[in-house]
């Protein structure tokens, strides 16, 4: 028989007071129904909401820990969490509390392995990029060597008895089979 996925219960709505008109309304609304002021939850209200949400999940969290979570969220995302984020956190906290110590350690080990795989992947990509860069550098050096050899041969052609290409009128060394400039084949 297939297992059913457990669904989280719906989020509990809190009653808050509008900062402008002081009308009490549910957090289900994103704006005050009386004056239309957007919902602004202060730090203390969020701490109480997190504690209530965790309690609804059958667990508890002390005020100090709730404050630490909200501070960490604010530092990471540069804003205060909304009630949906708090509700999801409460669900995660209750699941963690239900887990045994061995399961928690196993989860941490999986996360550590995932991080090390990411680091290994980044290192591998960096090595590939370095290898590619070295190959490009070698190709560039080979092209430069070829150009220098051609220039050297052209200089020799000028000094010695030279073959003149019928196509481009370029001077070539006497022993050349092809023109150094246009690639035309000399007739023997």
Image (tube, rainbow, N blue to C red):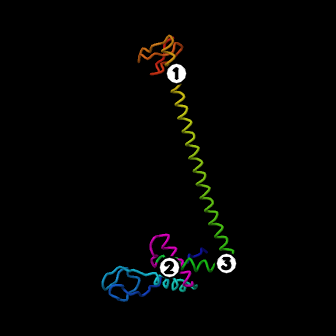
Determine which of the numbered discs, if any, sits on residue 87 in the image. Answer: 2
Q: Earlier in the sequence, mark 2 or mark 1?
A: 2
- Give the labeled residue for mark 3: 100
Query: Dot 2: few (<14), some (14–19), or many (≥20) neighbours within 10 Å?
Result: many
Across and down, in percent, residue 42 comes to 43, 81
Magenta stretch secondary structure, dominant? helix
Dot 1: element: helix
Across and down, in percent, residue 14 comes to 44, 86
Task: Report, in whole angstroms, how far the alpha carbon at label 1 lies from the one at label 3.
Answer: 78 Å
Q: Nearer the viewer, residue 129 or 67?
A: 67
Task: Report, in whole angstroms, how far the alpha carbon at label 3 lies from the one at label 2.
Answer: 22 Å
Dot 2: element: helix
Q: Is residue 21 above or below residue 133?
A: below
The quadrant in which residue 25 appears is bottom left
Q: Earlier in the sequence, mark 1 or mark 3?
A: 3
Query: Dot 3: few (<14), some (14–19), or many (≥20) neighbours within 10 Å?
Result: few
Residue visible at 48% across and 84% down in the picture: 49
Q: Earlier in the sequence, mark 3 or mark 2?
A: 2
Q: Nearer the viewer, residue 147 or 181?
A: 147
Task: Report, in whole angstroms, how far the alpha carbon at label 2 lies from the one at label 1.
Answer: 77 Å
Taking 106 as reference, is 59 left or right? Answer: left
Tell me where the magenta segment starts and ends, as one range: 61-83
Query: Dot 1: few (<14), some (14–19), or many (≥20) neighbours within 10 Å?
Result: few
Residue lying furthest right: 102
Q: How many marks?
A: 3
Taking 10 as reference, is 104 left or right? Answer: right
Across and down, in percent, residue 87 comes to 50, 79
Q: Is residue 152 above or below residue 91?
A: above
Q: Nearer the viewer, residue 95 or 133?
A: 133
Across and down, in percent, residue 153 comes to 52, 19
Taking 138 as reference, is 74 left or right? Answer: left
- Give the labeled residue for mark 1: 152
């Amino acid at each position: 028989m297939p297992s059913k996925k457990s669904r989280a219960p719906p989020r509990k709505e809190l009653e808050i007071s509008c900062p402008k008109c002081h009308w009490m309304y549910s957090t289900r609304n994103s704006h005050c129904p009386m004056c239309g002021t957007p919902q602004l939850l202060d730090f203390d209200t969020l701490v109480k909401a997190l504690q209530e949400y965790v309690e609804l999940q059958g667990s508890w969290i002390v005020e100090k820990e709730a404050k630490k979570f909200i501070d960490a969220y604010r530092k990471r995302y540069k804003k205060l969490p909304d009630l949906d984020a708090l509700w999801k956190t409460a669900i995660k906290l209750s699941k963690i509390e239900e887990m045994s110590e061995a399961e928690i350690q196993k989860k941490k080990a999986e996360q550590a392995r995932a991080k090390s795989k990411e680091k290994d992947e980044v290192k591998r990509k960096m090595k590939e990029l370095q290898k590619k860069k070295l190959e490009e550098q070698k190709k560039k050096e080979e092209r430069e060597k070829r150009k220098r050899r051609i220039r050297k041969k052209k200089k020799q052609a000028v000094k010695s008895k030279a073959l003149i290409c019928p196509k481009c009128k370029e001077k070539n060394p006497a022993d050349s089979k092809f023109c150094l400039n246009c690639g035309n084949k000399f007739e023997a």
